[in-house]
Image (spheres, rainbow, N blue to C red):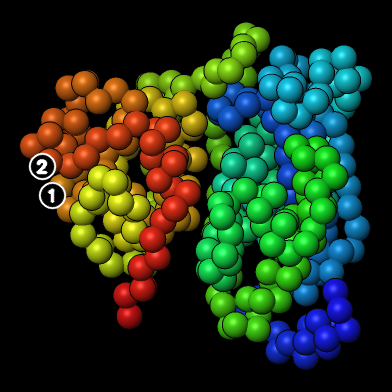
């Protein structure tokens, strides 16, 4: 940071409504599904202005196959002597307590953490989360995509060990601080979302697998969730070949490879309206089984609503057109 940057930072009027502290978190996991486990976790604690206070890192024994070793590099041999999650839960909680959880794609990290605490029969002391993807969109940063490496490159942060929890958390902490100050200078309201503790978990043994994520199991219990109203007006129906726009309505049907709740939260954070049923206003139906005769797929055909699979929807989420908020 230059001397000019330091002076600008010192002179930044700080919004009173901003949080008093942050916990920048990264977790590496055995996969993406609800029965996957955390295998390493890192936390950088930051003060109200984003300055680093301390950091913490641990391996976690998942008591199962470690998943994509070629990504995170943590083998069963490395993890065998690591503590179990209940053994590090208190230390982890101490670093989260009273702070806003900050992560890149925060809903994923939060849900993995919340499930581990649920399995340990306790609750993570987190009330709010902030997704740095959502913040970069609020700041309209000129990023080619929403990968952590792109955010880091934008702020000149050097990544040393990608997919290592401690280095990913460091990189994110270093990129979050200038993002936070840019938000303060611009009077941007931080995209804070509520963190709800989970009251369900899966302890089912998981067989080793390669390149496969378990789907959401139909018939398993899933609590109903009341989502906040979408702040964007519906700009009209989606047109194939064009980007989605904030305010468009999307609905989901059937099993998904990524937890349905995670997909819905990603859609909400992107500014889409997640609908529980289909109408003529619905822009998209997301389903991996478009030929099924469910009530939603039947209605989609009746209304002429485009039906796409989960992979195509994930691609569309990467490029959401911004819509002016209503009022």
Image quadrant where residue 27 sits: top right
How dense is the environment of label 2, judged by Cα within 10 Å: few (below 14), some, or many (20 and up)? some
Can residue 202 be seen? no
Residue drawn at x 62%, y 19% is 203
- Side of 61 where 131 appears, left or right: left
- State which quarter of the image contains the C terminus: bottom left
Residue 285 placement (x, y as % from top left):
26, 39
Residue 139 placement (x, y as % from top left):
56, 71
Asked if residue 49 is positioned above or below residue 317 in the image, the reply reads below
According to the image, label 1 marks what residue?
A: 280
The answer for how far apart the CA atoms under marks 1 and 2 are is: 6 Å
Residue 149 placement (x, y as % from top left):
69, 49
Q: Residue furthest left?
A: 302
- Side of 51 where 146 appears, left or right: left
Q: Are marks 1 and 2 in contact (CB under 8 Å)?
A: yes
Asked if residue 205 is positioned above or below residue 107 in the image, the reply reads above
**Foreground of the two, 215 or 199:** 215
Image quadrant where residue 85 sits: top right
- Side of 1 where 141 appears, left or right: left
Residue drawn at x 70%, y 85% is 14
Residue drawn at x 74%, y 45% is 26
Can residue 314 be seen? yes
How dense is the environment of label 1, judged by Cα within 10 Å: few (below 14), some, or many (20 and up)? few
Image quadrant where residue 297 sits: top left
**Foreground of the two, 81 or 154:** 154
Residue drawn at x 75%, y 68% is 177
According to the image, label 2 marks what residue?
A: 303
Disc on the earlier residue, 1 or 2? 1
């Amino acid at each position: 940071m230059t001397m000019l940057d330091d002076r600008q930072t010192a002179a930044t009027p700080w919004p009173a409504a901003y949080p008093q502290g942050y916990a920048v978190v990264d977790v590496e996991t055995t996969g993406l599904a609800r029965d996957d486990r955390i295998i390493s976790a890192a936390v950088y604690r930051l003060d109200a202005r984003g300055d680093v206070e301390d950091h913490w890192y641990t391996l976690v024994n998942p008591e199962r196959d470690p998943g994509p070793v070629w990504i995170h590099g943590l083998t069963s041999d490395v993890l065998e002597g690591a503590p179990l999650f209940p053994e590090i839960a208190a230390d982890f909680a101490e670093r989260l307590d009273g702070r806003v959880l900050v992560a890149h794609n925060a809903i994923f990290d939060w849900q993995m953490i919340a499930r581990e605490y649920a399995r340990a029969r306790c609750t993570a002391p987190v009330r709010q989360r902030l997704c740095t993807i959502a913040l970069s969109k609020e700041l309209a940063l000129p990023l080619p995509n929403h990968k952590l490496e792109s955010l880091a490159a934008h702020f000149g942060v050097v990544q040393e060990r990608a997919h290592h929890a401690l280095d990913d958390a460091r990189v994110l902490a270093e990129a979050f601080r200038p993002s936070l100050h840019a938000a303060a200078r611009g009077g941007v309201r931080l995209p804070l979302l509520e963190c709800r503790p989970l009251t369900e978990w899966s302890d089912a043994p998981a067989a080793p697998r390669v390149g496969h994520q378990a789907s959401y199991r139909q018939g398993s219990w899933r609590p109903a969730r009341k989502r906040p109203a979408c702040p964007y007006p519906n700009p009209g129906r989606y047109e194939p070949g064009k980007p989605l726009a904030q305010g468009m309505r999307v609905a989901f049907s059937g099993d998904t490879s990524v937890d349905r709740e995670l997909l819905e939260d990603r859609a909400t954070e992107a500014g889409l309206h997640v609908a529980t049923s289909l109408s003529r206003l619905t822009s998209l139906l997301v389903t991996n089984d478009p030929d099924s005769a469910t009530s939603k797929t039947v209605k989609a055909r009746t209304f002429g609503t485009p039906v796409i699979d989960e992979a195509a929807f994930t691609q569309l989420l990467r490029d959401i057109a911004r819509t002016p908020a209503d009022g």
